[in-house]
Amino acid sequence: MNLNLIIIITTAVALVAYLVSKVNDKAGAAMTVVGSLFALIAVFLLRDSIGTEITLLYFNFNLTVTGWYFALVMLMAYSMTAFFNPFWMKKLIYPAGYNFLYLLSMAGTLGVFFAKDFITLFVFWETVVWSSAFIIQMGKSRQAAYVYYVISAIGSMATLFAIMFAYGTTGTFVINDAFGGLAAYPGRAIVIFVTFIAAGMAKIGIFPFHVWLPFAHGSAPHTFSPVLSGGLVKMGAFVALLSVTAFPAYKIFGGMASFRGIPLPIYFMMALGAISIVVGTLMAIKQEDAKKLLAYSSVANGGYILIGLLMLDQVGFAGGLMHIVNHAVASAAAFLSIAAVAYRTGTTKMSEMGGMIHRMPITYVVYLIAIISMAGIPPMGGFVSKWLIFQGLADKGLLFIAATAFFGSIGSFLYVFRPLSAVFLGQTFTRDLNKKEVGVFMLFPMVVLTLLSLLTGIFPNIFLRVVTEIQTSLGVLPVTLAENTIVTNNGFLDAFKVFIVFGFGFAIAFVLFIARRKSRRVELMDTYTSAEFIHTRELLHYSHSFYAPFERLYEKAPDTMKLYHKAAVKISEIGNFAEAIFFGIKPARTVLLVMGTVLIGIIAGGVLS
Amino acid sequence: MNAMNFIYAFLMLVFVFIFQTSLTGFNRKVTARLQKRYGARWYQQFLDIFKAMRKDSTTHGWVFDFGVIMALGGIMATVIFIPVAGFRAFPGTDNVFVISYLLAVGMLGMAMSAAGSGNPWASIGVGRALTNMLAYDIPLMIVIFTMIFAFDSASVGELAKMQQGMGILGWNAFRMPLGGIVAVIALMGMLGKKPFDSFIAPAEIASGPMVEYGGKHLGFMFILHEFMTFIEVSLIINLFFGGGATIWEYMLKYAVLYTFTNIVSGVMPRFKIDQAVKYFYRVPLAMAIIQGIVVIFTGLGVTIWF
């Protein structure tokens, strides 16, 4: 099977799913499962044909190992989330449209990752943006889709400009040639670099483009948020990757002023990534909605990915690439578990539920493993990639970026713990006492993702071998791998050994625990309450503004969205001003004035020259 | 990795428990003398732990139990990774990031269990503890980052060894004096000593994470606290005070530093949690960054003493 067939078949399945959904929406949703699983397996089997090129109509594809790696991550998010689709059909206004766009956007991502030239890249990119924008507006708010589309459009237009400018300079649309030929024009190269990476930054949600994530992730249908955060955001990472590899940024900017070996244009982008880490972390800490919280955590993690990718070295770059997988898996699992809870309780507001662990224990474990990975705690995958990024930063001595990376890392303990404590732990609300665990069909993808998180954490080298292939194919020195060990300049990490020792410690604690007398089970309400008599479960649950003392420290910080609103008001004021001048009471006078000014300018210019 | 490693690891756990618990007992005496009391006997801490372990306990569901086990398991695993005077139960696993993040597993377990008790007081305590962690860890991590950059190694054992054989001025606490001060202040925060003890809130009757614990659960928490203290003090001893060429030297330095933190704690008032954050993000953070800039851009501190 070749790539053309995969894209054609998934698009065809999308159309069929649309028609089937008109008759029976659940059957149509089942087709999204089939279609995405098919694509996942088919793309996985493409491994042997890596290095070949193929053409479909006007579109040229190049099967690189990088594209293959990204495509697998994306399809993993799509196919696992698809299992939830059949259960959400009743809640959607346009189930047929949802199923169609779900598969269409998936087919679009394949085109992006394997694109050989810019036209292919751009067409498929826009396919994804448009179809996902239409899915997002099926959720809680239409405004979310506007924000998403506007930010995406800013990125897309910037990229289109970069593409055309690069074409104008080098005369070709083939990605590697068009960018490779820019070395002779460093001045233009800066403009192209900044505008091209803009689309990627907008998609990853790097500051100041991060505003769309909480809107879109928070309001999209619960079944699409995992795809957005686990999958689509990684398309931005792909563009960021292109802008340092296909666009040989280090070579072109090599002669420029640099900071600790990083040319300033690249360092500036890394600094934006660092700001995203801080902003994402601080905002995530104070969210009251679980999905918005996870969306801001995606902003922070996008910062790590960007920093890792832009380092383009042996260690940090590998960390960035691996973090793409780890974050996709963890974030998809976390969003799915929140979706499962929302499926039962009907809300994602953290203050409206509690103690779900007693009703949905498996979902709880899924969320727990996901956040352990997301926060970068061993023995899960997130630790390995963050470890690599830290090692890369320490190698180069990038002190300020490292400081924000540490802040984001410790800060993530704070925010990931909030849904854990507010949604799953604490008192079960009276309303939720009769709720049950979700069905097997929904548990399956969550458990698979959980096992993947564990696998990336215990045997990271399985994934890092592909990463080394990518590094070799891009001409970067690959990260050194021994049997179970990752070796860097500053030391090595044996993730398997860490896991075994953790298991050893856990076993001792477990034996010690069961060796002592069995404890008596008491009701959750049977707690120490400082001599108050509280009989309402809801009142004995602490979840609202969990970190109030800490939040108070930065409550006056400016809100980016408000700044944008202010800017919008200012722009419309300027427009009104212009309108008042030109279309005021006596427009003729204004026209005369302007013409007079221009005339005087021309004469003056003529005299002076 | 063979059976001997596991036996060593187990023996190390036993040693650490006995050593640290005795030291805690001794420090209870020191604190008492500061407050003009006679104080309990040095082995009182052992009696307290064994008493708690023998008593009946109540549980609030499986996560309450599981969290306690996960906490102690994670913390014990971290202890096994700590190099003590050149001894490592599992050679080559003492990466500083592994240690500081594996420590987080234990803390997460503790937080999970406390929040799982259903008591809002416990959740408040957890919230404060995590905030406190965000405060002290950033300055400390910046100093450690600087050290990794300076000496090209992230292995705690290696970093300790590099400081040995040059006398007292070879210690990183003197090569990077600002970093050394930051480390000791951060250690006070890590140990929950005054002025950074508001998350444990020992003076309030019940608003800490421990509010629902009794019996063997409480015993577990006591043991866990001893191990955690060992990890935290050991990190600072190894990274900033040259570790120890022999076990005796190590134990001596350890006892002096730990007792020092206790004496400081004995005469300090307490910060509210937001005051602690403000404090850490003003003084120690600034010192850490200055230290980092000095080391990374001038090389001063890496080579100055020889």
Image (cartoon, coloured by chain):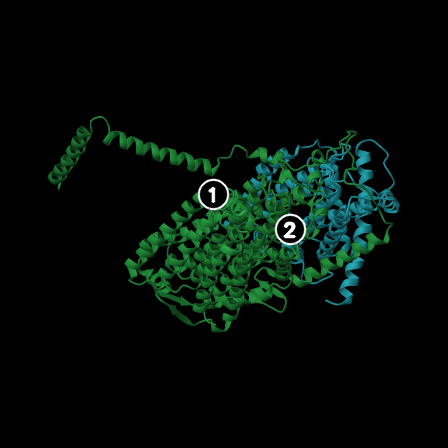
Chain colours: A green, B cyan
For the residue pair A322 and B49, the one nearer the viewer reads as: A322
Q: Nearer the viewer, mark 2 or mark 1?
A: 1
At which x and y percent is residue A39? 51, 65
Vertical comparison of A160 with B177: above or below? below
Q: Residue at x 14, y 34 (%)?
A: A600
Vertical comparison of A204 with A530: above or below? below
Residue reaching furthest top? A585
Question: What's the distance in space between the residues labelled 2 and 1, CA to CA?
Answer: 25 Å
Which element carries disc 1, helix, strand or loop?
helix
A305 to the left or right of A521: left
Can the viewer see residue A315? Answer: no
Amino acid at circle 1: Ala
Which element carries disc 2, helix, strand or loop?
helix
Residue named by callout 1:
A144
Vertical comparison of B266 with B80: above or below? above
The circle on residue A367 is 2
The circle on residue A5 is none
Q: Which of marks 1 and 2 precedes in the sequence?
A: 1
Instruction: Point out the image quarter for the C terminus of chain A.
Output: top left
